[in-house]
Image: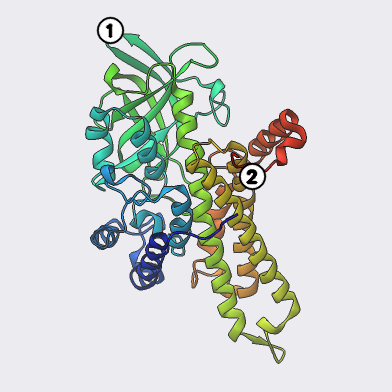
Amino acid sequence: MDFTIPAHIEDLREQIASFVETELLPVEADRANYDPHENIRLDVLAAKRAKAREQGLWCLQLAPETGGRGVGRVGMAVCYEEMNRSIFGPVTFNSAAPDDGNMMVMEALGTDEQKDWWLKPVVDGKVRSAFAMTEPHPGAGSDPGMMQTVARKDGDDYVVQGHKWFITGADEAEHFILVARTSDDARRGHTCFLFHKDDPGWEITRRIPIMGPEEHGGHCEMIFDGLRIPRRNVVLEEGRGLKVVQTRLGVARLTHCMRWLGLARRCVEIATEYASRREGFGIRLADRESVQIMLGTLCADIEVGRLLVMKAAWGLDQGSYAQKEVSMAKVHVANLLHRAADAAIQINGARGYSKDTVLEWIYRYARQARLVDGADEVHRMVLNRYLAGEGRAFFRWPVAEA
């Protein structure tokens, strides 16, 4: 098994590391650069995005013909981890959710016309996007089979009625992907559509306040009451919505993990630096066995997470959906991020609990990790389903052809 990465990926990683160190960490350290929702101010972001683009550090995940660098999933694992040393990193490089997953699925499944009017402005950083799937009870959450939003055909159009909530980025998005039911068929009953914010027949009813800091555009509740979508805006084809969702969410779940590993490492970095200089009762914190155990355990857990992510990324690059590998990575890394933030705050004491570091920001952000793109329990159920079906073969190694 070869864990080396290509030289050009290492060059990209080094460029990203340098950019984060010189351009983003100083911005992150000044609270004047934050917006009211605790993200980077849009004017500051625009300036940093322009610099990142000038240096070729833009949309690394997309193919060159789409406007990216074509690094593949393994390359993304390396680069995304480095980006999220800063809490402002992914959005600066146009690699943050939900745009990240939306761009990749439209690159894979969009028509040439859809790529031109819908995808290209997102790739260019001119507009933001959102993915509207989750619904309030009794609608769809982790189970898309419960979907209540419907799109009924009317000539060459579809007319949408329904209710969505916790739609990330919706308040600042111009381009949307919408999942709605078009029939009662369990497998072919969902369809994905594209629409623009100016299309009539829908509205955002509220931006939902949350526990942690927010992505740009927040998490919104939306009502659809007669939104008309032309047939040309169907993604893939009618009834193939679950295929679109699977294509999008498999990679999106893993990119979350890639970024969270960067945040977990940042927590260890802050904790290690403080422990090396803080003394109590005549001894540095770094010399206390209890602190060494905390940090050593986190280092091992981070490396386990990196291996899980890299195995899943390799599987995706080989053309697999890597569903069980992604689920394992998602459960492990989501919980790891929370433990890393918690341990770093404990080591930093009151300083960690204050806003003098980004630890409390990461801690509040980390709690959503166990919920977004499928709760822990759902992914563990997925893993158990594979175990029940595969038995001992669940743990098989991929075997090269003779």
Residue 48, percent from left and from top: 28, 62
Q: 50 and 207: which one is in front?
A: 50
Residue 377, percent from left and from top: 67, 38
Residue 56, percent from left and from top: 28, 59
Residue 296, percent from left and from top: 68, 70
Classify residue 301 by image quadrant: bottom right
Is disc 2 placed on a helix, strand or loop?
Answer: helix
Q: How many marks?
A: 2
Q: Which residue lies under the disc numbered 1?
A: 155
Please tell me whether residue 167 is drawn above or below residue 260 in the rendered image: above
Q: 209 and 292: which one is in front?
A: 292
Q: Amino acid at mark 2?
A: Met
Extreme residue in the bottom direction: 282
Looking at the image, residue 151 sits to the left or right of residue 2; the answer is left
Please tell me whether residue 141 is drawn above or below residue 359 in the rendered image: above
Q: 340 and 63: which one is in front?
A: 63
The disc, 2 or 1, on the residue closer to the chain's N-terminal end is 1
Q: Which residue lies under the disc numbered 2?
A: 328
Extreme residue in the top direction: 155
Is disc 1 placed on a helix, strand or loop?
Answer: loop
At horizontal 43% and vertical 14% (from top left) the residue drawn is: 182
User: Looking at the image, do the residues carrying marks 2 and 1 touch, with CB atoms under 8 Å apart?
Assistant: no
The crowding category of the residue bearing disc 2, from other C-alpha atoms within 10 Å (few below 14, some 14 to 19, many at least 20), is many
Q: Is residue 85 visible?
A: yes
Q: Amino acid at mark 1?
A: Gly
The crowding category of the residue bearing disc 1, from other C-alpha atoms within 10 Å (few below 14, some 14 to 19, many at least 20), is few
